[in-house]
């Protein structure tokens, strides 16, 4: 038997842009990002939460698409977003139906305007219809602008597991339009900063110190500071994906998932009453405490990290951490195996050696994790010292 290996080399551009009011007639950013053969179709999928927060949006987007020279507008579709849209295949199926009925083909573009959950579903619909239609993502929440929206993953939850079904697909472009960001409800907007804290902790100590220095402005959601945070975080995430050596997560190491083994499990244990952002706050507090209690991270940076999380009004403990399995171990610990299983291979969890410096470990001591959770419980209600 004989065979041969062929090298298929694919180089893809990951375009990340920042703007304001992308759909006013004079903003050409979107038009300039798209190419047409004279009859490319374009359709926009809009998260209903965004459509409600911006009542003129649908009309504005429709007008914009109509005016795009050389494109055929297929109008807008509004669907309910939020975690529920990832919970079954209804939204995905409805999106496929729309794509089919509108005759969207591989020369067309899908535009998706929404939070991280809705982007995940429409990203999956776009990646699978006709084996992949070009997608322009407009993330509209702090979390999706500073993290998920600039990523290359999509998915829905299935079999009781987060993101069980999905693909890796580099979007044609990501446009972070800050005018959407400032319309998100305050608590959620503040919580979404958590992914910026995360990427700073694993990649960029100077950025963490900057966040620390600007905590008061961030807590008040001072627009300029929030935008700078989102922009720095988005660029760090995109740079990691492009230059980190493993854009499609074939290896075991997942530095951008610091704190996420517990977070994903807590979201599921609380039936998504804890948002992804809140759960990541708790997961990062736990892995920070564990990094400290195992002697990797000294006490001073560990306390600084917890202080930043608390100042940003993120939870650092939750009652669901106490939920036990029949054998008496905490339910959240099953998150470790599910985290491993998602990639396969060896369990690999990132802990901190210092701010901005991570270390992969391949096992976690459950007794010590118990201690960390007990300790976090005692800290949760203490006021934050300024
Ligand atoms: N694909 C990835 O790489 C990746 C990475 C991290 C997180 N995620 C996923 O992202 C999801 C969380 O996303 P999220 O935090 O953006 O929340 P979300 O998408 O669940 O949105 C929360 C709510 O806000 C509404 N909304 C969105 N933008 C708004 C705006 N500008 N104004 C008012 N309301 C608005 C939505 O309709 C929804 O009801 C989770 O499912 C998580 O797993 C994906
Ligand atoms: Zn996350």
Image: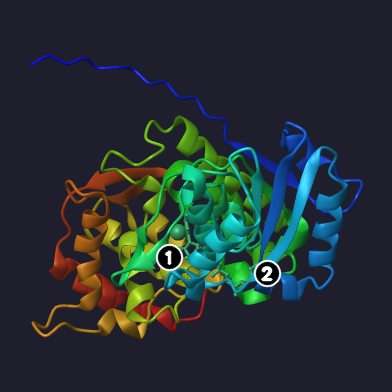
Query: Where 182 falls versus 211 (above or below)?
Result: below
- Give the quadrant of ligand 2: bottom left
**Residue 184 seen anywhere in this rendered image of the structure:** no
Q: Mark 2 points at which residue?
A: 78
Taking the spot 28% from the left edge, 70% from the top edge, the residue there is 159
**Contact? badges 1 and 2 (CB < 8 Å):** no
| Image point (34%, 17%), residue name | 7
Q: On the rendered image, what quadrant is the C terminus found in?
A: bottom right
Side (left or right) of 288 relative to 210? left
Mark 1 or 2, which is nearer the eye? 2
The location of residue 146, given as percent across then percent down, is 58, 53
Residue shown at the point (38%, 30%) measured from the top left: 245
Earlier in the chain: of badge 1 and badge 2, it is: 2
Queried on whether the Cβ of the residue with tag 2 lies below 8 angstroms from ligand 1, the answer reads no
- Identify the residue under disc 1: 280
Q: Is residue 76 left or right of residue 276?
A: right
Residue 306, image quadrant: bottom left
Percent coordinates x, y for residue 84 in the rendering:
49, 76
Disc 1 crowd rating (10 Å Cα; few below 14, some 14-19, many 20+) is: many
120 and 311: which one is in front? 120
Percent position of residue 212, x then y: 57, 57
Q: Does the residue labelled 1 lie within 8 Å of ligand 2?
A: yes
Q: Identify which residue, 356 or 58, lies in the foreground.
A: 58
């Amino acid at each position: 038997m004989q065979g041969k290996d062929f090298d298929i080399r694919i180089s893809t551009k990951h375009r990340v842009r920042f703007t304001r009011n992308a759909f006013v007639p004079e903003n050409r950013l979107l038009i300039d990002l798209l190419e047409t053969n004279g009859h490319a179709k374009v359709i926009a999928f809009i998260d209903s939460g965004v459509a409600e927060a911006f009542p003129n949006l649908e009309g504005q987007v429709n007008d914009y698409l109509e005016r795009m020279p050389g494109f055929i507008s297929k109008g807008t579709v509004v669907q309910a977003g939020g975690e529920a849209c990832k919970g079954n295949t209804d939204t995905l199926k409805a999106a496929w139906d729309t794509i089919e009925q509108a005759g969207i083909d591989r020369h067309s573009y899908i535009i998706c305007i929404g939070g991280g959950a809705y982007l995940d579903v429409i990203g999956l619909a776009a990646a699978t219809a006709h084996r992949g239609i070009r997608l322009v993502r407009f993330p509209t929440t702090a979390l999706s602008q500073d993290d998920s929206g600039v990523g290359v993953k999509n998915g829905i939850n299935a079999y009781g597991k987060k993101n069980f079904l999905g693909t890796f697909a580099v979007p044609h472009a990501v446009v972070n339009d800050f005018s959407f960001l400032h319309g998100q409800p305050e608590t959620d907007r503040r919580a979404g900063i958590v992914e910026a804290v995360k990427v700073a902790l694993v990649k960029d100590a100077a950025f963490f110190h900057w966040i620390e220095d600007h905590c008061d402005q961030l807590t008040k959601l001072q627009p300029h500071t929030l935008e700078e945070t989102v922009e720095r975080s988005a660029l760090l995430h995109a740079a990691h994906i492009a230059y980190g050596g493993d854009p499609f997560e074939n290896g075991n190491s997942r530095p951008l998932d610091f704190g996420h083994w517990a977070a994903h499990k807590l979201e599921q244990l609380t039936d998504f009453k804890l948002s992804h952002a809140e759960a990541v706050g708790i997961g990062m507090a736990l892995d920070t405490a564990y990094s400290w209690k195992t002697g990797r991270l000294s006490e001073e940076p560990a306390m600084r990290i917890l202080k930043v999380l608390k100042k940003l009004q993120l939870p650092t403990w939750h009652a669901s951490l106490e939920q036990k399995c029949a054998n008496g171990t905490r339910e959240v610990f099953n998150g470790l195996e599910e985290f491993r299983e998602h990639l396969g291979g060896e369990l690999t969890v990132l802990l901190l050696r210092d701010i901005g410096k991570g270390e992969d470990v391949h096992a976690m001591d459950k007794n010590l994790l118990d201690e960390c959770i007990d300790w976090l419980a005692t800290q949760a209600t203490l006021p934050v010292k300024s």
